Amino acid sequence: MPLAELISQIQELPKIDKLRLMEFLATELVKEEDANFFVANQEYPVWSPYDCSEAANVLMNLLTTKRQEQDG
């Protein structure tokens, strides 16, 4: 099947199927790149904005500075 035909069929898919296709393709690429990239039943840390008050303070200070520059 030519790529152009495949793309036109993908464009007709519902959003959820496009997301599933992206997940499938990403998984396939990882498998081809390194078979041991992710290990089954292994925990991997994921960054979360929770309990990051220092970062929130930096952003608030930046916003305050920008507002003062615009008003001043």
Image (cartoon, helix red, strand yellow):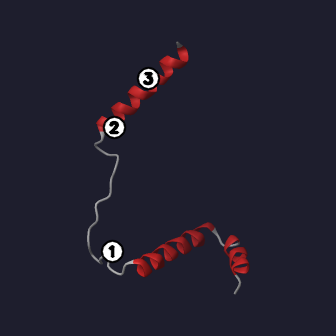
> What is the C-alpha distance between the residues marked 1 and 3?
42 Å
Residue on which disc 3 sits: 64
In the picture, the quarter occupied by the N terminus is: bottom right
**Camera-side residue of 16 and 65:** 65
Residue on which disc 2 sits: 55
> What is the C-alpha distance between the residues marked 2 and 3?
14 Å
Residue on which disc 1 sits: 38
| Left/right of residue 63 with respect to residue 40 in the rendered view | right
**Camera-side residue of 66 and 48:** 66
- Residue density around tag 2, few if under 14, some if 14–19, many if 20 or more, within 10 Å: few
Which residue sits furthest left? Answer: 42
Residue 10: image quadrant is bottom right
Identity, as a three-letter code, of the amino acid under mark 3: Thr
> What is the C-alpha distance between the residues marked 2 and 1?
30 Å
| Left/right of residue 3 with respect to residue 30 in the rendered view | right
Q: Earlier in the sequence, mark 2 or mark 3?
A: 2
The residue that appears at 45% across and 27% down in the rendered structure is: 63
Identity, as a three-letter code, of the amino acid under mark 1: Phe
Identity, as a three-letter code, of the amino acid under mark 2: Ala
The residue that appears at 28% across and 60% down in the rendered structure is: 45
Above or below — where is 50 with respect to 38? above
Q: Earlier in the sequence, mark 2 or mark 1?
A: 1
| Contact between labelled residues 1 and 2, with CB atoms less than 8 Å apart | no
The residue that appears at 36% across and 81% down in the rendered structure is: 35
Residue 56's tag is: none
Residue 8: give x, y in percent of width and height: 73, 74
Q: Which of marks 1 and 3 is nearer the N terminus?
A: 1
Query: In the structure shown, which secondary structural element does the residue marked by tag 1 occupy?
Result: loop
Which residue sits furthest top? Answer: 72
Query: In the structure shown, which secondary structural element does the residue marked by tag 3 occupy?
Result: helix
